[in-house]
Image (spheres, helix red, strand yellow):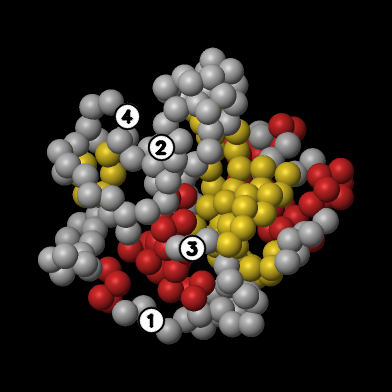
Amino acid sequence: GRLAGKAENRISQVRGLGPAKHIMISLPQEDFGLVSTDYPGLRRKVYKILKRVGTRGGCLIFHPFRRRCPRCGSIPEMGHKICSFCGNYWFEWYFSPHFHVVGFGWIEGTGQEFLRSGYVVKNIGRRRSVGGTVLYQLSHAGVHLDYHVVTWFGVCSYNKLRVVQEDREGNTCPTCGARLIPCAWFGEGEDPLATEGEGEYWVDPEGWRYTARYR
């Protein structure tokens, strides 16, 4: 989508900090209520924690839910459709707020941070495709009418990074050259791509609808 393309373009223009990393930060249960009572304050708290463990900046995407196996309780790996522990063939979503970051920094001191704040910071590592990672995280991100889905902080913030406009060719179909427009699943049953990993897919258009106007 266009938002993922813009994020990839912005991240690509950061210099001197090495390749972008995928980082996840999970809330302790006592802070779950902040999601509904003080989301801006929660986000500021997350920024401070990320800075303490060495994150220099990046984009932040919020997820309110996770998947788990209802039979054995295990958490599936990204893109898995069958539980690797018990063989169950479906997963349920449960409330477990966390944030994903695609950004920069040398992540360290996460154990001490957990003892200090209760927040779990996990360095998932370098990404082969920054745009693909952002696109996958956006596919099941939390959406609120009052807040942006993607926010920028640190070296990637709007007041610290001046971005050269992206090449519009990156927002066109590689096969026919038409404009790419965001869409979402409105068909019957579950989103057929909900359990897929990051990437680009050819799918049957039935059940999908555009979520933005043609311009």
Mark 2 Cα within 10 Å, few/some/many (few <14, many 20+)?
Answer: many
Mark 1 Cα within 10 Å, few/some/many (few <14, many 20+)?
Answer: few
Residue at mark 3 to residue at mark 1: CA–CA distance: 22 Å
Q: Are marks 2 and 3 in contact (CB under 8 Å)?
A: no
Q: Residue at x 31, y 79 (%)?
A: 167
Residue at mark 2 to residue at mark 4: CA–CA distance: 10 Å
Q: Which residue is mark 2?
A: 195
Residue at mark 2 to residue at mark 3: CA–CA distance: 19 Å
**Residue 111 or residue 210, whichever sits in front:** 111
Q: Which residue is mark 3?
A: 128
**Residue 212 or residue 17, whichever sits in front:** 17
Q: Residue at x 75, y 44 (%)?
A: 119
Q: Which amino acid does the dot numbered 3 rest on?
A: Arg
Q: Nearer the viewer, mark 2 or mark 3?
A: 3
**Residue 214 or residue 183, whichever sits in front:** 183
Q: Which comes before the other along the chain, label 2 or label 4?
A: 4
Q: Which residue is mark 4?
A: 190
Quarter of the image where the C terminus is located: bottom left
Q: Are marks 3 and 1 in contact (CB under 8 Å)?
A: no
Mark 3 Cα within 10 Å, few/some/many (few <14, many 20+)?
Answer: few
Q: What element does badge 1 sit on?
A: loop
Q: Residue at x 74, y 33 (%)?
A: 30
Q: Residue at x 41, y 58 (%)?
A: 132
Q: Which amino acid does the dot numbered 1 rest on?
A: Gln
Residue 178 visible:
no
Q: Which amino acid does the dot numbered 2 rest on?
A: Thr
Residue 15 visible:
yes
